[in-house]
Amino acid sequence: MHLSIIGSPGCGKSTLFQALSGNIVGNRSGSDHVAVIDVPDYRIDELVRIFKPKKTIYTRITLADTAAIMEGDIKSDNAGVKNIQQMRGSDALLLTLRNFDNGGAVRLRDEFLTIYSEFIISDMIQIEGRMERIRRQGVKKDNTLLAQEEEILSECLAHLSEEKPLSTAAVFNTGEKQLRNFQFLSGKPMMVVVNSSDERNLAADSTIEELRNTIPDHIPILSADGKLEAELALMSEEEQKVFMEEYGIQQSVRGRIIRMASEMLGLISFLTVGEDECRAWPVRNGSTAQDAAAAIHTDLGQKFIRAETVSYSDFINSGGFAECKKKGLWRLEGKTYVVQDGDILSIRAGN
């Protein structure tokens, strides 16, 4: 999973990056901050205790703190090619909005619309460029696939022209295969983090309500005190526990964002175990056993024969594989078996 943290200047993006990654962020010196974090998984922790493997691998998230975006950056090419590519290559975007006093008025709604407008402009420029190339190709040779692509892109462009993001366009979902390689920014899954100081009463904040009425329903919103969370991320587990109890924090922003991102992207994890390695493998919800095999290695997917599987809960409750087999809980499944979150899999493949 790859998340890009985005936002306007002064919104606290780097502070949020520190809260999520646990890395102290210094001066940018012109480059993005990138970190890879492990996703906590109690199931892997328990399996490690049982198997004592040489290697432990959790699901991982790559975080990128991209350069700030200002109004007009896309049109004037000030956003930078690298910055745009970073965002386009992300699985989801984490938009940070400022809800604290830094000498300027708090305008959550305006900040959100500024970023979304830049994305819409970027997508329009990309589509117009591609449609021009299609027209040039179409003059030389009649091509049905290009004609279909042009039709879908025309519908996308019409939707964007109404200042609506592609994430709300019906054609964007129905034409997903043709549009997948474009990596449109306004079609990216997005979460919004309202970065607030603890002095602000979020529940009574009219700007929050105004924001909720502006943001499309499919975009989740959460609020967090970025500065407080960044301090929390640098503490030991023991210190974190005391700190969270003192400030009444039920779950860290890191935990909330990981959970929301996984739900938004429809991700689950299957598990592989043994003395060599215990590992969590992220796959899309609805993936088959053959898809899971391919996630481990392309050859396993291609030469897939069967998957041996048992649920994590059955494995733990039964006390191991031997009892699972006695109870008939350890099963052989074919390539069309739909993998469930927490399945322990062993793949059988041909030579």
Image (tube, rainbow, N blue to C red):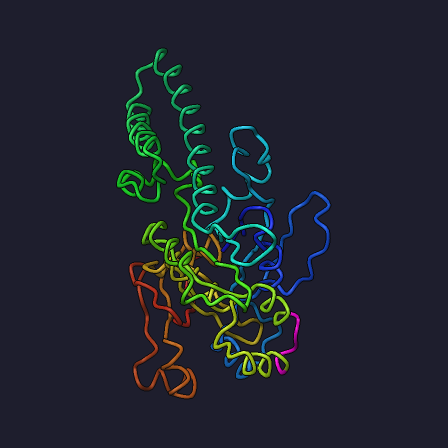
Q: Is residue 348 magenta?
A: no
Residue found 43% across the figure and 51% down from its top: 190
Q: In the image, is residue 232 above or below residue 145?
A: below
Q: Position of residue 302 (x, y in %)?
A: 41, 51
- Relative vertical location of residue 242 with respect to residue 230 in this rendering, above or below: below
Is 294 rendered above or below residue 241? above
Residue 109 appears in the picture as rendered = yes
Judge by depth and name the residue closer to the eye, 237 or 221.
221
Q: Is residue 80 left or right of residue 163?
A: right
| Residue 342, horizontal then vertical, whole percent | 40, 72
Q: Is residue 292 visible?
A: no
Magenta region, residue range: 234-238
Q: Nearer the viewer, residue 99 or 194?
A: 99
- On screen, residue 219 versus residue 26, left or right, reads left
Where residue 248 appears, as percent x and y from the top left, is 51, 79
Secondary structure that dominates the magenta span: loop
Residue appearing at x 38%, y 87% in the figure: 317
The residue depicted at 38 percent of the width and 22 percent of the height is: 131
Image-based side of 334 in relation to 192, left or right: left
